[in-house]
Amino acid sequence: MQQAAVLNKPVQPTGIERQWGEEEIIVSKTDLKGRVTYANDVFMRVSMMSEQELLGQPHNIIRHPDMPRCVFKLLWDTLAEGREIFAYVVNMAKNGDHYWVLAHVTPSFDDDGKIIGYHSSRRKPRVEAIQKIEPIYKTLLNIEKQYSKSKEGLEHSFKALIDTVAETGMPYDQFVFTL
């Protein structure tokens, strides 16, 4: 497994899944650069980070190394168009434990309709959805790792993601909800 950096310290994934309530919602807000401007208590508890550790940090501070980058490209491309997106994401807590979320990310707009930040609400996904998305994410991650240039790997995995969704005959948003 790869190492990831949490608070600029190498953290090895533990393989242990953190548990949190199905009725709970993880909420965060970020600025235009993806730096955390708000984190609710559930986010802090599940990520095992304090408000001081999260605020001002890039949201990818919780990125698990098993999460394919192409999913984040789709997320950021969709948000840049001013549209909301739903995505399954595996995150990593401060100690290396992981937790899955079904993220609903929306742009935040000012009174003139200009995007001023992003809001994310995350729920605990169904086990069946994780079982369906994990093999897809492993394939995408393997594609990313095949290339010595990360940009090239990202391009190929993104194409594979788009092709995978296209094979279903559904738009991405509909595909996510069939999992």
Image (tube, rainbow, N blue to C red):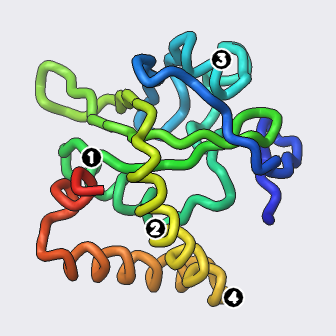
Residue 126's image quarter?
top left
How far apart marks 4 and 2 lie (CA) works out to 16 Å
Look at mark 2 in the image and give the residue it sits on: 70
User: Tag 2 or tag 1, which sits nearer the N-term?
Assistant: 2
Are the two marked residues, 4 and 2, in contact with CB atoms closer than 8 angstroms?
no
Task: Describe residue 137's horizontal placement relative to residue 85 as left or right.
Answer: right
Residue 123 percent coordinates (x, y)? 40, 30
Q: Which mark is residue 50?
A: none
SS assignment at label 1: strand
Q: Residue at x 23, y 51 (%)?
A: 177
Q: Indicate which disc residue 85 carries.
A: 1
Q: Quadrant of the C terminus?
A: bottom left
Dot 3 amino acid type = Arg
Decide which of tag 3 and tag 4 comes sooner along the chain: 3
Q: What secondary structure is marked by label 3?
A: helix
Which mark, residue 148?
4
Q: CA distance from mark 1 to mark 2?
A: 14 Å
Which amino acid type is marked by label 2?
A: Cys
Nearer-N-terminus badge (1/4): 1
168 shown above or below 91: below
Q: CA distance from mark 3 to mark 2?
A: 27 Å
Residue 42: x, y in percent? 55, 16
